[in-house]
Structures are given as C-alpha cells and as structure tokens.
Amino acid sequence: MEKKNGHTMTDSVSTEEILEKNGKKKKSCKDKLMRFLNRNMLVIMTVSGVLVGVGLGMMVRNMNLTRAQMTYFAFPGEMLLRMLKMIILPLVVCSLISGAASLDTRSLGKLGGIAVSYFLVTTLIASGIGVSLAFIIKPGVGAGALNTNNLGLESVNTNKETTDSFLDLARNLFPANLVAAAFRSVSISISLFTPRHLSLLSLSTDQSL
C-alpha cells in the first residue's frame, strides 16, 4: 500500500500479481479440461453414440417404416459390425504370433498342447449341444405352412433394385472373414443391350402382331 496526498493507493505490482494468478487459474482449468477430454474421448464418444442411437430408435419406432426403409436405416450399423468382424481374425493372429514369440520353446510346446486340447474339447462339446438341440427342437418343421398373407406380414420382394446392388457392393468391401473372401469367387451376371438387339426385338414384336 502506498500513500499519496493522504489517500491510500494499492500497489500496481500486487494487482498485476492477482491478475496473473487469475489467468493462471483459468489456464489451468482449461488445461485440465482438455486433458480430461483427450484421455476419455473414446468413452465420451461411445456413450454419446449410445444415447443418440437410443434417441433415434425411440423416434423411428412409431414411424411405421417399410422393410426397405428399415434396411437402409440399419445399413451404417451393419457396416460398422462388418468392419469389426473383419479385424477380429488379424488381431487374433497377430496376438498369437507376438505371444508365441515372447515365450520359451519349452513352455511354448506345453502351452500349445494345452491350448489345442482345450479348443478340441470345447468344439466337440459345442457341436454335441447343437446337434442334440437340433434333434430335440427340430427347427424349421412346419415353416412351409406359414403364409405371409394369412399372418398379415409384408411379403418379401425378390426383385433386387439398383440400390440393393450398391448396398451389396458396399457390404462385400468389408468381408467378415478375409481368408474366406480371398478364396471365394462371386459371379456377377451382366446383360448388355445394343441397338442391334433392340431392332431385332422390335421386328419380332411387329411380326407377332
């Protein structure tokens, strides 16, 4: 504090220090907020995506969408699931290779035998459960008696449109199994129409008339 002309004056240095402290506090709060967002960005985006999905589902639920509209609406989610399925096999293979490379040869042989026997036993158990349940439940029996007209369901249109072809093309870009997609061949039927074919078609129709 300084006295000038009988009046008390605050020191300019002290006010500057107070302003600097307030600025540092604001900067520290911003830095903490940015660090928190950077660390938890994945969790925040996941939770926000879940909330947005629930909200859209509740909004679309009462709109009485057709089967085609529901297919188009669910297409982005289907693409995300196909991408996740596509990276499962490379991740598993890479993790197995890295784990096997970090182990000793003695322990690797013992663990490999245990792992192979475990997979064989669990696969046999799962296959036995599936076959026994199929014999007990007999799925698909009586499905031929069902009629979509009697049940009031929408009949499935077998004619594929251009949009469906593009959606299938986008789906095939992200196969669920990369190894199976590498050895699988897909045949595409292409029909070409030239002016010569059109003229022959018009001649045949005129002769029939």
Image: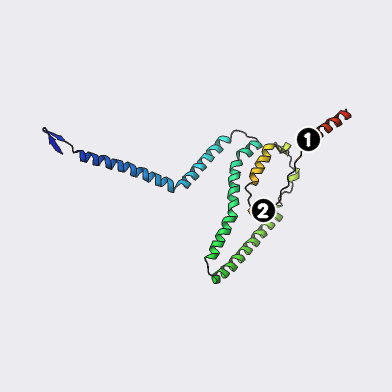
Compared across the picture, whether 101 is left or right of 125 comes to: left
Residue drawn where x is 56% and y is 56% of the image: 91
How far across and how far down the image is residue 193, in percent?
77, 36
Residue that protrudes farthest toward the left in the picture: 6
On the image, the x and y values in percent for residue 115 come to 59, 65
The colour scheme used here is rainbow
| Nearer-N-terminus badge (2/1) | 2
User: Where residue 116 sits in the image (x, y, percent)?
Assistant: 61, 65
Residue 81 in percent (x, y) is at 59, 47
Question: Disc count in the image?
Answer: 2
- Amino acid marked by disc 2: Ala
Q: In the image, what residue type sits under mark 1?
A: Thr
Quarter-of-image position of residue 53:
top right
Position of 111 relative to 70 (above/below): below
Query: Helix or strand or loop: what does disc 2 sit on?
Result: helix
Tell me the crowding category of disc 1: few under 14, some 14 to 19, or many 20 or more residues within 10 angstroms, Cα based. Answer: few
Residue at the spot of label 2: 182
Toward the viewer: 64 or 40? 40
Q: Give yes or no for contact between labels 2 and 1 (Cβ–Cβ under 8 Å).
A: no
Report the residue marked by disc 1.
194
How far is disc 2 from disc 1 in space, using C-alphas?
Answer: 34 Å
Residue 153 in view in this figure? no
